[in-house]
Amino acid sequence: MSANRHNLDDEANAREVITALQDEIRALDARLRGLHEAEAQLLATQSLLRTVIDEIPDFVILKDHEGRFLLANRPLASFYGTTPDQMVGKDDADFSASPEQAEFFRQNVKAIMARGVTEIVFEESTDDETGEVRYFKSIKKPFVGPDGDPRILVIAHDITDIRQAQARVEASEKLLGYVHEATREGIWDWDIPSGRLQHNARWFDILGFAPEQLTGTIADFKNRLHPDDLAGTMAALESALAGGADYRHEHRMICQDGRVIWTLDRGRIVEWDSQGQPIRMVGSFADITARKLAEQQLAESEERFRRLFEDTRQPLSLIDEGRFVATNQATLQMLRMTSPDQLIGRTPGDVSPPYQRDGRPSGEKALEMIQTALDLGSYEFEWEHVRANGECFPATILLTAIREHNREMMHVVWHDMTDAKKAQARIEYMAYYDALTGLPNRVLGQKLLSHAITAAHQRAASVAVLYLDLDKFKYINDTHGHELGDQLLKAVAIRLRSQLLGEEQVCRLSGDEFMLIFPSTPRPDVHNAMLRHCKQLLTSLESPFDLDGIRLSMSFSAGCAIYPQDGMDGDTLMRNAHTALYYAKKTGPRFYRLFEPPMNADLIRFVETREALRVALERNEFELHYQPQIDLSTRRVIGVEALIRWRRPGVGLVMPGDFIEVAEESGLILPIGRWALYEACQQGAVWGQRGWSNLSIGVNLSAVQFREGQLGEDVLKALDASGLHPARLDLELTESTLLCHQETISSTLTSWKALGIRLSIDDFGTGYASLAYLKRFKADTIKIDRSFVQHLLTDQEDRAIVKAIIQVAQSLNVCTIAEGVESFELAEQLASMGCDQVQGFVYSKPLPPDAFEKWLLAAEVLP
């Protein structure tokens, strides 16, 4: 029993144990289920946390104390081109090609962990392949891990877009600053409801205020406005606000120092309220005082130009697109028009003949002239015009291109050449034709003879030159006076013309000497033919001449030379014809001779004179006499002309007309001329030292000196040796010198003018000189030949000639001096005609230096 009881107790105990074990198993199973549930929940939480971390766009990083990654989210892994799991246990050096950058990151986190304080760090990362730089704002929080080791949590926010936007803003602001600085304009910002007005520094600089000196309201603007501009400016501003348009206005403002400046104010509405009312306007402010002053000066200049354009006596016009758009009264008077409407709107071709002198249509050529002026800037030319009354006239036109408001216009300056052309024609007529008889003169005669020789050579014909001379013509002048002598010469010219046939020509060479040219005479019979011509001419001239009731019977002598036997050129033929005439006159009146070689006694005289001149140079037989030149306005002596004389032993005082021609032909004129130049300069210097420092010294020059000598050098040496001031030296050239040696003397004359040496044209009117030569060679003085002066009081044609010469000289600003003045009445007449100076026997004959000094001392002022 007791055993059974014991078994029962053991069984009971066993059941209790089993029950207890079952309870513990059930409890353990419950705990295991709890643990599984907690683990599952933890895993879910971890997964959620991981998902959250991976979805955060910022970089989330957990590093250990050595900077190795313990955790990295997906954005960081993507940035490095890997996965989060592959980053664990590695550091930045494993993902960056830049060791320096990786080391910076490692040292930075170690330093922060050492300090144990959360820090915000701005850092950047550079892609070594692309070079792209990314900017980050990183929060770095250090802490201690479960194992007791330091850890650091990094959350890095990519701020690259923000940094780039800031950089763009900074660049824009910097650029705006440059613009403001470059434009030098003030900027203003107006809060309309409050009236607050803000300005930049330039606004204050322009007006000269410091910011603290003003209230910063719209009242500042109003108070600085010029009183006269206040109402208009505010009205413009209010109009812009009311209409929503841009504001722009020019007005004056008063600066801090009281100065008044012109300003350009511009503004634009930039903000409106909910009711559409403007609440903010921004604008700029510029100082335009300089522009306004320039505009005022331009307006004044335009007004002066308008008055000058309209009031000047010079004809002026404007052409636009080929038509006249403006003109002045002088132009209308020139064109004989009464109203501008007669010209405005018309073309240059409309006031021109159909064709110009070159045969081209006027309208077509006018367009070409305008285009040339546009291409060159200006263009001057001659043009034929038609006045309103139908009269044609020449004019010089100066076209100047002007540009106005992006338009190209033509400024036209007209110069009516009618009077100048008449004077030019008169001068040229005087150059080629004898003023008394109207016959060709020596210059034209030489040309005609040269042409005849050329034609005869081509035709194998002869040319005969006949010199004709009145016997004892001087007796007529002395007995009946020069006026009747001139009438006789005119009558002879008329009668000679009546005897000419075909191409035959008659010329007046000088005085009572005529030359007749018989071209293309058949060679076999030329000798007998010329004998018949001579006889017929002399016979026709034997008939008396009726002159103002005086009946004169005259005899003539003639000499003839024939091409080719008596000479191959015009000069030789003329010289031999003159020799034949000389022999005819030696024979007696009414004789004629044909040239024969033995007649050439002139050659003998030439040789004799030439040798005597050589001796004269060696023995110093030459001397200079001086004739005064008188200023007609002051009646004072202003200069002298040095005239050479030859005191020849056994002969006496020889005038230059008896030896200069031989000197020129032999070349001796070079040393003779050099001596005269040196002597005159020395004497002028002496007189200057004695008080006559304003006395000019006139020295005659020969064409031979230009052609064969070193005249430019001679003049400089003479001035240097004497010390004479160049302005006191007056070098006299003949017209023939200017004509024959233009290119040779041009540079020499230019150099002389540069030194101040004066230049005179001697014996003007007896040779050939045109306005072109006077202008080209810049002559200072024209010396009117005595042949035009001596009969001035009685001969109307001589007066006309002298008057024309004086007018031409005045138009060219050239002085005139009349030679051969032998009475005070004649001097007064010349003064009334505008002649500047005179010289002649009425004041003094040419005198040696000592005698001239005495005369000069007594002649301070002349009657």
Image: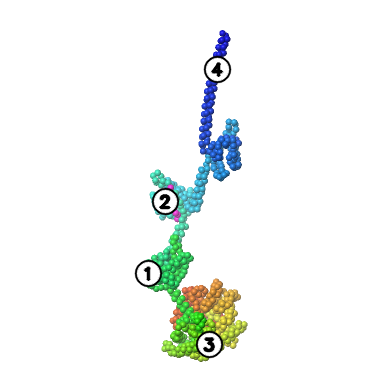
Nearer the viewer's eye, disc 3 or disc 1? 3
Q: Which mark is residue 246?
A: 2
Of label 2 and label 1, which has the lower sequence position? Answer: 2
Of label 4 and label 1, which has the lower sequence position? Answer: 4
* Rendering coords of residue 448 (x, y %): 49, 81
Q: Residue furthest right?
A: 618
Check disc 4 and report the residue beneath it.
Answer: 18
Label 4, label 1: how far apart the Cα atoms are:
151 Å
Residue 134 forms part of the magenta stretch:
no
Check disc 3 and report the residue beneath it.
Answer: 595
Label 3, label 4: how far apart the Cα atoms are:
189 Å
Give the amino acid type for the residue marked by disc 4 in the picture.
Ile
Q: Secondary structure at mark 4?
A: helix
Label 2, label 1: how far apart the Cα atoms are:
51 Å
* Rendering coords of residue 91 (x, y %): 59, 38
Pointer 2 with pointer 4, Cβ within 8 A: no
Give the amino acid type for the residue marked by disc 1 in the picture.
Thr
Q: Nearer the viewer, residue 43 or 114?
A: 43
The N terminus sits in image quarter:
top right
* Rendering coords of residue 692 (x, y %): 55, 76
Check disc 1 and report the residue beneath it.
Answer: 338
Give the amino acid type for the residue marked by disc 2 in the picture.
Asp
* Viewer can see residue 558: no
Nearer the viewer's eye, disc 3 or disc 4? 4
Counting every numbered tag in the picture gives 4
Q: Secondary structure at mark 1?
A: loop
Crowding around mark 4 (Cα neighbors within 10 Å: few <14, some 14 to 19, many 20+) is few
Q: Secondary structure at mark 2?
A: loop
Give the amino acid type for the residue marked by disc 3 in the picture.
Phe
Q: Residue at x 41, y 73 (%)?
A: 392
Crowding around mark 3 (Cα neighbors within 10 Å: few <14, some 14 to 19, many 20+) is many
